[in-house]
Amino acid sequence: MASTRDIRRRIKSVKNTRQITKAMELVAASKMKKAQQAALAGRAYAQLMADMLAALANRVEESQHPFLVQRPVKTRGILLVTTDKGLCGPLNANLFKLVTEIKGAAKYYVIGRKGSQFIARTKRDMVAEFPVTDRVAFSEVKVAAEFMVKQFLEGVIDTIEVIYPRFKNTLVQEPVVRPVLPLANLKEFMAHVKADAHHQPARNADTREILFEPNATQVLEALLPFYVNRHLYQLVLSAKASEHSARMVAMKTAKDNATKLLGDLTLEYNKARQAGITQEILEIAAAQFAAA
């Protein structure tokens, strides 16, 4: 049995660890609430975008738009959205598993230091890394989106796909590969829009006669690039909500484990202390018996 001094040191160490993990849990919970609100608030905007695209769907010749033209896929463009820091459970590991399943030529664009470290460590072709803060400003994500769209239009990559942790609830973050470009047709594009706005109430189709200025085709050409930027922004918001949720759960689990370990160590300390007292009493009694 360990000495009482060693057990006291371990108890002190576990108490410090529990204090740290509790503080990190509270910080993550605060950030999680803000990130979840931002992610959920964006879904109404995505629904409005879907309504606008629905109004255009039957009024344009969609096959001419470069975002909707199918072409042979020689090189895939993958945007990997991970965290900058660890201590968030298996969140990043699940994303890396999806990356390892990708076969064929691919170029990687990364948001998050953990992702860039993994891509560099596994010697994959990383083109660029984009810093995004916890606040997730649209201007930060827009840089990544416009850079990838430019490479897509120039033919450097033939697809734009996003690997990210999709936020479902506080306890569940689902690793997903989400294709963004190209899309087979405008209806498929709308399906992706509504997938992000699935918690919004369904709306009836707009059957009114709408006049587009200068014309429906030019409105679509302006709307689709804007939506791609906004779509990627919504995915990064979801990833940030997943990150803070996973970190809060991980820190809460660590705190609970520390509390349980502290109880076990306290019991062990009391037993060791009681054994020491009993031993001292026996020694005193034996000495008195010998003197008598």
Image (cartoon, rainbow, N blue to C red):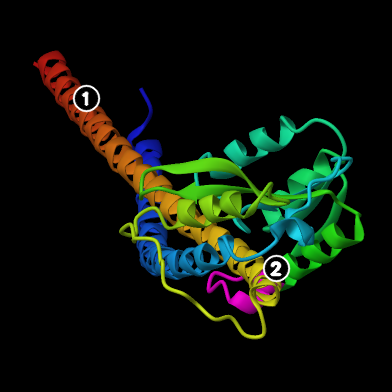
Is residue 136 found inside the magenta-colored segment of the image? yes
From the viewer's perspective, is the residue at label 1 or at label 2 nearer? 2
56 or 279: nearer the viewer: 56
Q: Residues within 10 Å of mark 2 (few under 14, many from 20)?
A: some
Measured along the vertical axis of the image, is residue 103 above or below residue 50?
above
> Residue 66 lies in what quarter of the image?
bottom right
99 or 88: nearer the viewer: 99
Task: Give the residue at the far bottom of this rendering.
Answer: 213
Sequence order check: which comes first, mark 1 or mark 2?
Answer: 2
Query: Residue at position x 62%, y 41% from top?
Result: 95
- Alpha carbon of mark 1 to alpha carbon of mark 2: how far? 58 Å
Q: Which residue is mark 2?
A: 131
Query: Residue at position x 27%, y 29% from top?
Result: 268
Q: Quadrant of the N terminus?
A: top left
Query: Residue at position x 79%, y 45% from top?
Result: 119
Q: Which residue is mark 1?
A: 275
Which amino acid is tagged 1?
Answer: Ala
Stretch of the chain drawn in magenta: 132-142
- Indicate the position of residue 125 as horizontal and vertical percent values: 88, 46
- Indicate the position of residue 74 as horizontal and vertical percent values: 89, 40
- Indicate the position of residue 140 as horizontal and vertical percent values: 66, 74
